Amino acid sequence: MQAPISFSISGQQLWLSPLKAIFWENQNTLILSDLHFGKSGHFRKSGIAIPQHVYRNDLQRLFALVQHFQPSSIIIVGDFFHSTQNKEAELFAKWRSDHSGIVFNLVRGNHDIFPDRWYETNNIKLHSDTYQQGPFCFVHEWSKCEDEERRGYHFSGHIHPGVRFKGVGKQSLRLPCFYFEQDYAILPAFGDFTGLAIIEPKRDANVFVIAGNQVLNLQ
């Protein structure tokens, strides 16, 4: 695995990985968002030929992160699985049973529609709106937070942030990113089978672009 890049906020040490996740050193915790596991299987069930290796690659990246950082807990900031249960959910359940010592916290996203019983069976703590750990609050959609909920530093997902680089002529390149503002962050979508929402960073924002096997600070 390529070395992550160091970033500190609210007195906490974070490591931004090119595998589209954050390791929160102070809490020995992995932070991920928008995995959309099972999306490729959902499309195949609808007759659209999506290769099975798409999901396997995502799962292998999760394996690699767990093996490298040895986290005691994982926080998923919404959209863990894409839709209804399928064989890909069964594959994850088998992996989860072999890693039962890791604490899983999931903030429910708009795609998290499995029955609550499934999460309970797989030892995943489900949070309907927000989850607080240490100085951070985790919410799937920052834009839906009420004013009174915006105290403290928030981590969110949902929009799959990315930036566009323009070259000569009409050439352009779109890359996913970690996006940090003064009071909230937006995480990149962990799943590869997802789109990108191009953002226009504010002047005081910190933007870290994921370019292949490295994370680059735009500042």
Image: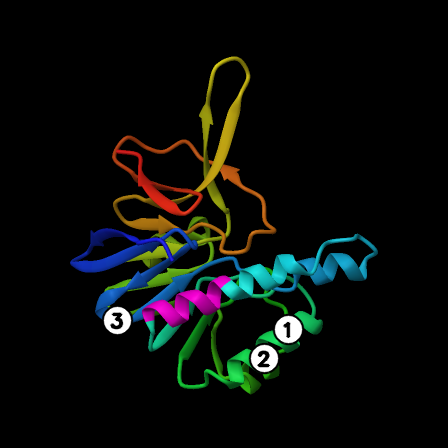
Mark 2 residue type: Ala
* Kind of residue at badge 3: Gln
**Which residues are drawn in magenta?**
61-69
What is the x, y in percent for residue 195?
Answer: 58, 44
- Name the element at disc 2: helix
The residue type indicated by label 1 comes to Ala
Determine crowd level at label 2: few under 14, some 14-19, many 20+ residues with C-alpha closer than 10 A.
Answer: some
Residue 201 position, x and y percent, is 36, 33
Q: Which mark is on residue 180?
A: none
Image-based side of 191 in relation to 21, left or right: right
Q: Based on the displayed image, in which of its 4 quarters is residue 79 positioned?
A: bottom right
Extreme residue toward the left, this view: 11
Q: Which residue is drawn at 71% across and 62% down?
A: 41
Tell me whether the residue at label 3 lies in contact with that at label 1, contact meaning CB atoms closer than 8 angstroms: no
Residue denoted by label 2:
93
Looking at the image, residue 151 sits to the left or right of residue 119; the answer is: left
Q: Which residue is drawn at 52% across and 85% down?
A: 97
Q: Residue 89 carries which label?
A: 1
Task: Work out which quarter of the rendered image holds the N terminus and state it.
Answer: bottom left
Q: In this view, does 205 lie to the left or right of 32?
A: left
Query: Which dot marks residue 27?
Result: 3
Secondary structure found at label 1? helix
